Image: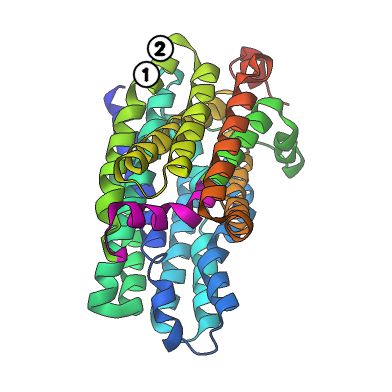
Amino acid sequence: MNPLEKRAVSGLSFIYVARMLGLFMLMPVLALDNDQLRYSTPLLLGLAIGIYGLAQAALQFPFGVASDRFGRKRVLVFGLLIFVLGSLLGAVTHNIWGIILARLLQGAGAVSSVLLATAGDLTGEQHRTKAMAAIGGSIAIAYVLGMALGPVFYGVWGLTGVFLVAAAFGVLALFPLWKIVPPIPHNHQQRMGTWRDALRMFKHPPVLTASIGIFILQMVLGASFVVLSPELVKAMHIPDTAIWEVYLPVMLLSVAAMVYPVIYAEKNKQHGQMLAFSGLGIAMGALIMGLLAGQFWPVAIGAVIFFAGYNIASAILPSMMSRSTTPEQRGAASGVYSLMQFLGIFVGGVVGGWGLGIAGEKGVFYILATVGLLLALQSWNGKRMALLLEPDCSQKL
């Protein structure tokens, strides 16, 4: 990558980390304040935890289209300010309905699609998979740090303090837009025309194929949240508060394991094959954890394989989606892709909870293995994956 591309990737990765960290920090601590929140019920608490994902899914496409029409950086600033507003509301409210609204506003700052479009604008095709890998790795880092820091800040300042720290991270995320991320050349971001033009991206075969892939991938992740943390705690014989001590090395090793496959896919144009390989990795890791649940080393190794497969796919899919569109389509295409991404997390959580209720923890791991195989089979379909790399795919609809 040239210096401008490195600046763009580092700045966009920082924005991802700061914003997602503010969301992830709240996940392990919201339930701890349940008794202190007025009008709270288990159902409303669950709604408070998950509603940000629905807001994200609903607004990714409108934000992406808006960035095509009004400019990436303007829409990024607007979305980050909404996130900060939601975080501040959460800090001053003391009832569950206020928390639900706060989480809704946090999710309404749905700028993931805009960040992906910006990365596509500022990186060349030959380096785009590396850029997406760096951004995908930053999200994994944000998840681990959020799981670790959320309980720490909660112990010092309570739920109010966690929301205030989230707001501070949202403000910090504005800094790279001002000082680090390069300006987007005018000829790299043209205007898409009408909303009707944008809606056609839902039928654009390369975008649709990549979006189905990310839906399956994120469904795996969402379902894994239901069983993975309890299984790691049980297998490692550690208290719940020490879960970050397990996630940190698992995530670091899985990120290291994804580097060679991503470089190989980019160098040899073997994206479809590596995506199929990632699906097999997810299936193998989940199967190991299911068959050998409760055993230290098998579960640890299975978790590393599982997340390595996930990280490989999370780097390759957005790169393939981005290169299949022209600059004036990129925001809308990223919006479709990100909508399916967050919808996959929501559906995965529901599927994971359903599987846990009828088949137990092992049953959920077997479901994860099955879905991983589905991703591998979808990716192995050479004709569909080839569409993502055909030059004709970038012609405007």
Q: Which mark is residue 267?
A: 2
Q: Over which residues does the magenta segment extend? A: 221-240
Using the rendered view, name the quadrant where residue 94 is placed: bottom left
Using the rendered view, name the quadrant where residue 335 is placed: top right
- Amino acid type at mark 2: Lys
Residue plotted at (61% across, 41% down):
215
150 vs 16: above or below: below
Q: Nearer the viewer, residue 310 or 229?
A: 229
- Residue 301, x across and y down, in percent: 34, 37
Residue plotted at (33% across, 59% down):
147
**Neighbours of disc 1 within 10 Å: few (<14), some (14-19), many (20+):** some
Name the image quarter holding the C terminus: top right
Q: Is residue 89 visible?
A: yes
**Magenta stretch holds residue 233:** yes
Name the image quarter holding the N terminus: top left
- Residue 129, x across and y down, in percent: 43, 25
Q: Is residue 66 visible?
A: no
Q: Residue furthest top?
A: 268
> Which residue, given by chain and number where applicable, does mark 1 sit on?
263
